[in-house]
Image: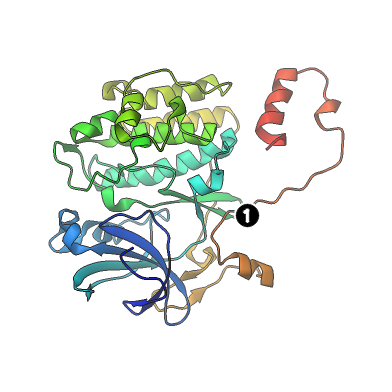
Amino acid sequence: MMLNLNESFAGLRILSLVSKQSFHREVYEALTPKSQKVYLIVYDNHNSRMLMDKGKMREFAMLSKLTNAAFPQPIKTGSLSYRGRTMSYMTAKHFEGTTLRALMCGRPLIVSVAVNIALQVMTAVMDLTAYTKGGGHYNLNPDTVIVSRVKGGVIVHLGGLDHVSGPCSGNPPFITSDLNPCCRAPETYLGRYKSASDVFSMGMLLSYMLLGNYPYNIDESAAESKIRAITNSGIELDLDDRPDELKEIISKAVSKKVRMRYADLCDMFSALNRFASENGIDTQAPVITKTQESGVSDADGKEKKGNEPKDEQQESDSETPRLKIEAKVKEGEGLLAVAGMEELKNALRRDFVDI
């Protein structure tokens, strides 16, 4: 780790490392002098020169302009000398959530939840495409999608923003060694990145949510060359008994040939949104205001509280970000009271009752 836990950095006390380690960038949970949690994004300037523009981190400049609530909300940026190294940092507002990987724990999500999360991710990435004039996120995977539960459903946050860039056709202006090969589009190994590369990643991510694991029986611990050979093979996806329209959307998204995919996430979003509408899936993401965010602090370190009262147990639970799901079982005959329609009843049992 770049920073030691419980030590002081930029006036903050470091609590925990919350992102995957890399040699140039890390994200921590930290505590302000007023005991408010914030996120702390830290770059080692020496190892991050290609990610800077006019001496400033491109990620920090970008986040100061993006207004989508899916992205970290900046509080303060700066740089300082730490153990003989120059470090750039940004503090961002804290929120409660868990990565998609941790949320699923190897279990598939029901179709409606997976589709809802996918649409929210695409909405955020489309903002990146507009900001970068045809580029994208380029590292969508289960570790860079964070899910929070709020009243009315779930909201999505995006991390891993150090790879955001415009279209590239040879030498990408970011570090590629830490990209997740399971969601990486085949053309990116040739240095070619564009909005259609995020389409491939989104297709793999949607498959991951529906299957509980990567498609094609990918072993995530395998060497990158083996994973690359699988994703580049163009073999047919096996999505079991998922709806045909959904299979078609995913198959088109993960085509190894760029020209066979959706041109960009806007096209894929339209297709998936149409599928959701035709199948009665609520695609309206819950509206969350800044004063509703749990554990959020403003720039002055003053806590902003939501309208719902917190009891002692809730305060204890908020220390560990995770999704809370409650279910109540009602007595009755259930599907046994419905005659016939066995195929529909089996689908309801699989996608709702058994879950």
At x 30%, y 43%, the residue is 179
Residue type highlighted by circle 1: Lys
**Is residue 125 found left or right of 281 in the rendered image?**
left
Q: Quadrant of residue 337?
A: top right
Numbered disc total = 1
Residue 283 image position (x, y, % from top left): 53, 40
* Residue denoted by label 1: 324
Q: Residues within 10 Å of mark 1 (few under 14, many from 20)?
A: few
Question: Is 330 placed above or below 16 here?
Answer: above
Residue 67, image x and y in percent? 36, 57
Image quadrant of residue 4? bottom left
Q: Secondary structure at mark 1?
A: loop
Q: Residue 351: where, in percent of width, then height?
A: 65, 32
Please identify the residue farthest to the bottom as the structure is shown: 33
- Is residue 244 shown above or below 11? above
The residue located at (46%, 39%) in the rendering is 119
Location of residue 176 by image quarter: top left
Residue sitting at 41 percent across and 36 percent down?
Answer: 220
Q: Is residue 166 above or below residue 192?
A: below
